[in-house]
Image: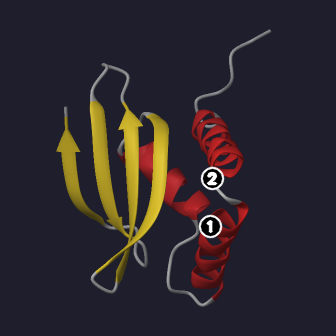
Amino acid sequence: MKPPRSSTLPFIALTSLLAGVLLSSPASASDRDHDRARAAVKAGQVVPLRTVLERLEREHPGQVLDVELEDEDGRLVYEVKLLQGDGRLVKLELDARTATVLRRKER
């Protein structure tokens, strides 16, 4: 079996993350979060996550470990944790409307 292409790794990681969240949290909370995110995409308030991940793969390559959509003082922000090839953990905060990196932290 050949290993997955690097472009599929973020999708696999996100799918695993979402499955874990759905299995471990109450259905009503995850449903509300999912509905809120879907409504924000439809209303044009946020860039779809797929688009954000494609941009990140080009500009900040690494394996996606976690993605959250947060409301920070009325501004929607994607928080993305990446594990880069050299072992560094990178946390990025992106403006959810433009996918512009607002903050970058490394460990």
Residue 38 shown left or right of residue 53 in the figure? right
Work out which residue is located at the far bottom of the displayed protein and give it. 43
Q: Mark 2 points at which residue?
A: 25
Indicate the quadrant where residue 20 lies: top right
Rendered location of residue 49, percent (x, y)? 56, 62
Which label number is shown at residue 102? none
Q: How far apart are marks 2 and 1 (CA)?
A: 7 Å
Residue type marked 1: Ala
Rendered location of residue 71, percent (x, y)? 38, 76
How was the colour assigned to the protein in this rendering? secondary structure
Work out which residue is located at the far top of the displayed protein and give it. 1
Residue at 29% across, 39% down: 90
Confirm or deny contact between disc 2 and disc 1 (CB under 8 A).
Answer: yes
Work out which residue is located at the far right of the displayed protein and give it. 1
Secondary structure beneath disc 1?
A: helix
Residue 28 shown left or right of residue 48 in the figure? right
Q: Name the residue under label 1.
A: 29
Indicate the quadrant where residue 61 lies: top left
Residue at 27% across, 26% down: 88
Residue at 57% across, 83% down: 40
Work out which residue is located at the far front of the displayed protein and give it. 26
Vertical placement of 97 versus 87: above or below?
below
Rendered location of residue 62, percent (x, y)? 42, 33
Q: In which quarter of the image is the N terminus?
A: top right
Vertical placement of 101 versus 41: above or below?
above
Within-10-Å neighbours for mark 1: few <14, some 14–19, many 20+: few
Residue at 30% across, 59% down: 93
Rendered location of residue 52, percent (x, y)? 49, 60
Residue 42 shown left or right of residue 73 in the figure? right
Within-10-Å neighbours for mark 2: few <14, some 14–19, many 20+: few
Residue 43 shown left or right of residue 71 in the figure? right
Residue type marked 2: Ser
